[in-house]
Image (cartoon, rainbow, N blue to C red):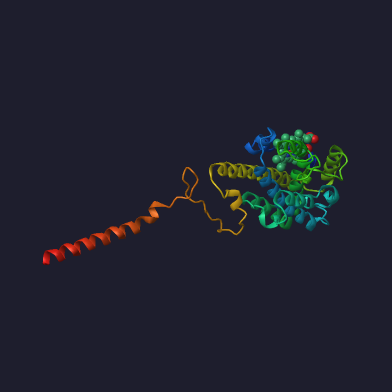
């Protein structure tokens, strides 16, 4: 008789994750943002946006990893020297946004949702953390390397790797071998079939959070090409909710600020009314004479 699990899900967690996320992986690759990126159609604005989002995501992810590094549901996957990205993303933020990057970088709603999910998992369901580390770190060690080369060329960046520290893993000699080690550690985690099922579901959620992020960033970039300054992405820097103000002035075709005709109407009405009153009084005066 066949094992009941063989129909539904591979035995090894790494295989189960790969299989379950195949479809969402294709979906992620085919988002407009990623399709453009692969064609080398990425500009500095788009690249800065996605890098800032990654900064927030890795801060949250690695905070939750640190919280759970001693927990057996995660501890075999603790590889801070090899994997952790926060420090390198800080270097990249300084390169792209300058010395005051902490106040400058955008924090978009889709990024906030991703960050929120990471904290929920890390605090309340740490057995699912592997789904998020798998999605990000194995992804970075795979397609990430291709994206690095594309960005270097498209953005005309120095070969020294400045601005792209995120994509380099100096403490990993062979990405292929490291991924094998990581998969075997994933497979060594003890988990019930029920937990395994939830982990696999969470990996799909992690991909969807990435897809939603790409869709949002694409939308922001599209709006910016239509709108005049300040860009929507720039306005997202003002992180206080409800304080995102639309200060775009009305523009003439030549770009000069034009007074709003509607806002002047009350004044016009007053001038006309006053003239009418003066004329009436004068007429009545003349008639009485
Ligand atoms: C243009 C976009 C992308 C390209 C070209 C790409 C490419 C690849 C390639 C070629 C592999 C296979 C590597 C191997 O088998 O050793 C891979 C694996 C992987 N990718 Fe992507 N990828 C992209 C986007 C993404 C995104 C957005 C994510 C998630 C955030 C992601 C997560 C992963 C993961 C987790 C793996 C490892 C799968 C496994 O071995 O179990 N990828 N990717």
Residue 289: x and y in percent read: 11, 67
Q: Nearer the viewer, residue 242 or 248?
A: 248
Residue 20: x and y in percent read: 71, 38
For the point 78% across and 54% down, the residue is: 65
Residue 83: x and y in percent read: 82, 47
Q: Nearer the viewer, residue 6 or 38?
A: 38
Q: Answer yes or no: is residue 93 visible.
A: yes
Horizontal placement of 254 versus 94: left or right?
left
Q: Answer yes or no: is residue 4 visible.
A: no
Which of the four quarters of the rendered structure image does ligand 1 lie in? top right
Horizontal placement of 201 versus 162: left or right?
left
Q: Based on the displayed image, in which of its 4 quarters is residue 59 positioned?
A: bottom right
Horizontal placement of 150 versus 45: left or right?
right
For the point 66% across and 40% down, the residue is: 43
Q: Based on the displayed image, in which of its 4 quarters is residue 17 positioned?
A: top right
Q: Nearer the viewer, residue 82 or 9?
A: 82
Residue 36: x and y in percent read: 65, 35
Work out which quarter of the rendered image holds the N terminus and state it.
Answer: top right
For the point 38% across and 56% down, the residue is: 264
């Amino acid at each position: 008789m066949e094992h009941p699990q063989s129909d539904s899900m591979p035995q090894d967690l790494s295989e189960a994750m790969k299989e379950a996320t195949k479809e969402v992986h294709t979906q992620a690759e085919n988002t407009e943002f990623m399709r453009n990126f692969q064609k080398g159609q990425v500009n500095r604005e788009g690249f800065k946006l996605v890098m800032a989002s990654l900064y927030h995501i890795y801060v949250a992810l690695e905070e939750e990893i640190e919280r759970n590094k001693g927990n057996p549901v995660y501890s075999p996957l603790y590889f801070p020297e090899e994997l952790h990205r926060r420090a390198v993303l800080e270097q990249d933020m300084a390169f792209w946004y300058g010395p005051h990057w902490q106040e400058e970088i955008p924090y978009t709603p889709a990024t906030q949702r991703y960050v929120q999910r990471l904290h929920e998992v890390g605090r309340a369901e740490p057995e699912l953390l592997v789904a998020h580390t798998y999605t990000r770190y194995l992804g970075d060690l795979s397609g990430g390397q291709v994206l690095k080369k594309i960005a270097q060329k498209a953005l005309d960046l120095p070969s020294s790797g400045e601005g792209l520290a995120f994509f380099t893993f100096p403490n990993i000699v062979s990405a292929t071998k490291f991924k094998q080690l990581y998969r075997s550690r994933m497979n060594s985690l003890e988990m019930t079939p029920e937990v395994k099922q939830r982990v696999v579901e969470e990996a799909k959620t992690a991909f969807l959070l990435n897809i939603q992020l790409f869709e949002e960033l694409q939308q922001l970039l599209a709006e910016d090409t239509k709108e005049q300054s300040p860009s929507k992405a720039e306005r997202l820097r003002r992180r206080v909710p409800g304080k995102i103000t639309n200060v775009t002035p009305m523009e003439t075709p030549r770009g000069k600020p034009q007074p709003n005709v509607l806002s002047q109407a009350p004044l016009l009405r007053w001038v006309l009314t006053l003239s009418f009153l003066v004329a009436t009084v004068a007429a009545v005066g003349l008639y009485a004479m």
